[in-house]
Image (cartoon, grey):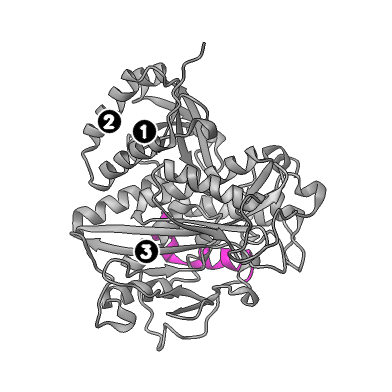
Amino acid sequence: MREFLELSYAELEEKNLQCKEQRKNRVAPEQIREERLKYLTDEKRIKAVTVMFSDLEGRLHMLDYDKKFLLGSWDNLTFDGSSIRGFTAQRESDLRLGIDWSAFYHAPADIFGAGKVLAFCEVIDKDGSFYQGDIRGVLKGYAQSKFASDGYTLNAANEIEGFLFAGQDAERDYYKTGKFEYVNTGGYYHSLPGDPLRTFIDTTAEVQRAMGFQNEKDHPEVAPSQFEINYGYGEVVAAADQIQLYKLICRQVARKMGLTASFLPKPVVGVNGSGMHTNVSISKKGKNLFWDPQGQEKISKFAWSFVDRILTHGNDICLMLNASVNAYRRLDPHFEAPNQIIASAVDRGSMVRIPIGNERSARVEVRSVGPDANPYMVMLSVFKTGLEGSISKEKNLRQAKRYLPDNIYDAMDNFNNAEWTGTLLGNDVKGRYAELKKASADRCARLLGTVVKVSEVQFHHEVYNQYLWNQF
């Protein structure tokens, strides 16, 4: 008989919230590690630990380590980095995975399999430092440095939209079908209880809740078969981890229903695309530094300087926020597209919006982000730009009519020509990222046109089909 761990959703939520609280309170890494190792040793019903890391484009990779093996080898988990797009060359392929014991999740058995727990990892270079191609590690180092030097806690929450399509492999089979099939046509906020979209949303929300997401609201979005499931703020690395988990959970729940959860920014022409509105703020000793009841739109001068830097570098960082050929279909002004490099409290076509807030919730919303972008790269580019970028001397910067590019080639040119992107990523990683984006773009039609092309789906970095990529 197999006796693998299967906890109720209530037990899972309690355990995951305990882990989340430790992470939020910055409990010493050594203490957390010893607690986790003791838990794994004592809980005999756990069979494996799923470790997760992300490549340069943000695609999530997972390995299962036998628990007994991991307990003896957790500090020396090596893998071949040359097999990961955007990582090392073959001649220097040995990398290690360093488990981030604070980023530890107890997983629902019906979704991830019985007897498994999950943990995020950093990729470690030969000299023991964070590997520069692992943007999660770079982001974590940056966040830690800002806390150490300035006492800043970088906070983020994301509103991640996606589509639910018929069939388990709708994206991978697009080259055969040339279309996506909706499972619901109700539209904004409307989905009857028990229909496929509502069942998917309810099930996904339950899994998120069990994994400590602290949900806020969920609903069908504007486009047919589109969804959004919102959850609370978190420290920046934890927030980016939750984006990866959110998409993984959505895909897994959809697959178990015989459907596909898609995070292509614009899978269907003629309806609204999917965004990943990124809400950010900075706090110090529990005080929200973006709040000022007397300030313009009730945010502080510090917050407005943050906004001005993002607007100044809007075109420089666009390729990091809109990472695919398909993403530039979404930057279409006919569908509330945030393609204007302006800041506004009311204009949803602005790159940056200032939502209504109070002392607790005052924030800046970067609206131009696509849901397929590397979440760690999004957070790094937004926060580092907002804190350390330059501010243009252009008059009326916040309302000047400038636009984000409408195709990936212009975005690549802006990215390659900007000194700032080298500062963000380092010139070596910048070059690798640019090569990956060019490789995808060159496999697609240069002009987007009015039809989603097979190639922009087939060669999309999040579509899990290595076989099709190699057929080019």
In depth, the one of 108 and 329 nearer the eye is 108
Amino acid, disc 1: Ile
Amino acid, disc 3: Val
Would you identify the image quadrant in which residue 370 lies?
bottom right
**Disc number lying in front (1 or 3):** 3
Q: Quadrant for the C terminus, please.
A: top right
Determine the secondary structure under disc 2: helix
Residue beneath disc 3:
280
The answer to the question of whether label 1 and label 2 lie on touching residues, with beta carbons closer than 8 A, is yes
How far, Cα to Cα, is label 1 from label 3?
26 Å
Give the left or right position of residue 249, taking residue 291 as reference.
Answer: right
Report the number of numbered marks: 3
Residue 201, how many percent across, how many down?
56, 51
Determine the secondary structure under disc 1: strand
Q: Residue furthest front?
A: 193
Q: Is residue 405 above or below residue 156?
A: below
Determine the secondary structure under disc 3: strand
Query: What is the number of the mark on residue 99?
Result: 1
Mark 1 or mark 2: name the one nearer the start of the chain: 2
Instruction: Give me the residue at 68% from left, 44% from top.
Output: 259
Magenta residues (range): 406-425
Residue beneath disc 2:
33
Instruction: Give me the residue at 47% from left, 86% from top.
Output: 400
